[in-house]
Image (spheres, grey):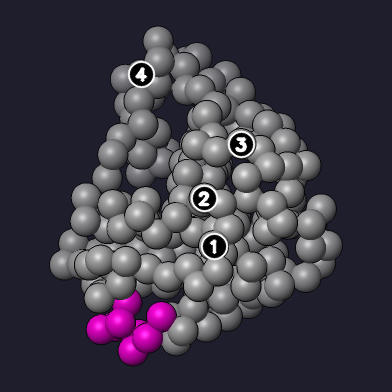
Amino acid sequence: MKKTMPNNGQFELITLPYAPDALEPVISAQTIGFHHGKHLQTYVTNLNAILADGKFAGKSLEEIVSVADGAAFNNAGQILNHNLYFTQFAAPKQGNAPIGTLAAAIEKQFGSFDAFREEFEKKGAGLFGSGWVWLSADADGALHITQEGNAGNPLTKGLTPLLTFDVWEHAYYLDFQNRRAAYLSALWQIVNWQEVEQRYIGR
């Protein structure tokens, strides 16, 4: 998994690989403005303030998530989670589906993409409160769907995160109000499977 290093001791807000309105109508430019520009920026600002004591000097974001607790973990975890979330998307595409070795692994393990998708959405819709639903891979390439509350990341369980849907309400409330299930179902249109495939083969 590629490491995210600080720049002169400070982590930075990621630049989105698309225009703010590129994901519409699935995710609106307004949601991107709040979610990326305000929520994620706050986590970055908070983590940089915490890092001022030098305890995690020179460590990557992934290393901090693996060893930290409390406020350091919460803010570093949310940055890592959101970075993975935002960079896994591209403009909407009908019939969007996995590719390459990941597609084969999903087919082998879940029987079909539709079966995988159904289980993934069910885990996302069924997560109580705020958090994330993840597709991750272990060292042998086996796939795992997990629920993580709050800032949780499967990295802490020795897994490589591949794909995540954010089920904090701020991720979808402006566009879907309280319809979490509809939001989860719509996200498949904007998954950049080339990016997710690279995460799988590069783990």
Screen quadrant of the N terminus:
top left
Give, as a three-letter code, the residue at label 4.
Ala
Mark 1 secondary-structure assignment: loop
Give, as a three-letter code, the residue at label 3.
Ala
Q: Earlier in the sequence, mark 4 or mark 3?
A: 3
Q: Give the residue number, with chain letter if any, for mark 3.
A: 19
Q: Earlier in the sequence, mark 2 or mark 3?
A: 3
- The reply to whether residue 193 is in sight is yes
* Mark 1 crowdedness (10 Å alpha carbons): few <14, some 14-19, many ≥20: few
Magenta span dominant secondary structure: helix
Give, as a three-letter code, the residue at label 1.
Lys
Q: Give the residue number, with chain letter if any, for mark 4.
A: 57
Q: Residue at x 57, y 80 (%)?
A: 122
* Residue 16 located left or right of residue 200: right
Q: Give the residue number, with chain letter if any, for mark 2.
A: 90
Compared with residue 86, is residue 36 higher up or lower down, i.e. above or below?
above
- The reply to whether residue 127 is in sight is no
- Residue furthest out toward the front: 94
